[in-house]
Each structure stands twice: as structure tokens, then as C-alpha cells.
Amino acid sequence: MKNNIGLKIRQLRELRGFSQEYMANRLSLSQRQYSKIERNEAKIDWYKIVEISDILEITPFNLVSFDDTLIFNNNSTPEKFNDFTYNYPEKLVEQYERIIEQYEKRIEQYERRIKQLEEEASLLKLTFVKNKEPK
């Protein structure tokens, strides 16, 4: 079976959520030139593989040896449509968990700040009402 490096690059790019335009810009290529890489219509050397792997945050070895069955375990049967089980790489899961944790901390900070502002607004309202009372 022919080594389909272009397909591997496309699958990893899609897993990362990157567009072809994004990849092309990072590689200083046109989108059309980049598309040819993914379709195996352009030969790429080891330096380009290293460059692509850096963008995809994966080692060059893991890029060339990428096996999509490790990520998507297709358990389809004639009775069912595709039933995918996602097995994301541990590093990717950890990265997203860190991002979620950071957002949760920000939300807590915003909630505390909102509460502070509400208390300040309440105090200002009381002060305003007291100053409006007839003497």
C-alpha cells in the first residue's frame, strides 16, 4: 500500500481544526500549492515535513507514521451507519482540559467582579436615595 502522507497531513490538519488557508500561510505557500500536498500531487522533502509537523504540533515521526484508526475506531456494521468512537491523543485531551480550566477560572473571576459591582451599585443607590430624602 502506498504511503499517503498527504492524507495523513489532511487528517491531522482537520483534527487540529486548521484550514488549508491557515496551513498555506504558515508554510508561505498558496492555498492551491498546499492543496496539492494533501492530494499527493506535490512531492515534499523532509524539511517540509518537519515544518508541517511543527505547525500541527506533532513530531515528524508521528506525522509520517500517523494511523487514523488510533483516533477513529470505526465499528460500523451492515445494520448500522458509522458508529465512531473517538480516542483522542492524551496530549490533546490534556491541552483542552487546561484550556477549560483556564476558562472556568476566568468565569469565577468575572462572577466575583459582577457581584462586587452589584454591591457597589446597591450602595450607590442607597446613598442616592438618602440624599434625595426631604430634610
Image: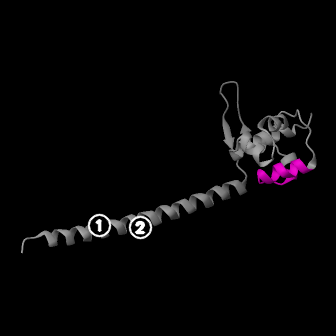
Q: Is residue 92 left or right of residue 129?
A: right
Name the residue beneath numbered marker 2: 112
Q: Is residue 73 left or right of residue 46?
A: left
Residue drawn at point x = 70 percent, y = 49 percent: 88
Which x, y percent locates residue 8?
82, 41
The residue most toward the bottom is 135
- Which structural element holds mark 2? helix
Q: Earlier in the sequence, mark 2 or mark 1?
A: 2
Q: Quadrant of residue 40?
A: top right
Residue drawn at point x = 77 percent, y = 51 percent: 55
Q: Amino acid at mark 2?
A: Arg
Q: Residues within 10 Å of mark 2 (few under 14, many from 20)?
A: few
| Visual colour scheme | one colour
Q: Is residue 83 left or right of residue 135?
A: right
Q: Which residues are magenta?
A: 47-62
Q: Is residue 133 visible?
A: yes
Q: Work out which quarter of the rendered image holds the N terminus and state it.
A: top right
Which numbered mark, 2 or 1, is in the foreground of this view?
1
Name the residue beneath numbered marker 1: 121
Q: Amino acid at mark 1?
A: Ala
Q: Quadrant of residue 38?
A: top right
Q: Main secondary structure of the magenta part?
A: helix
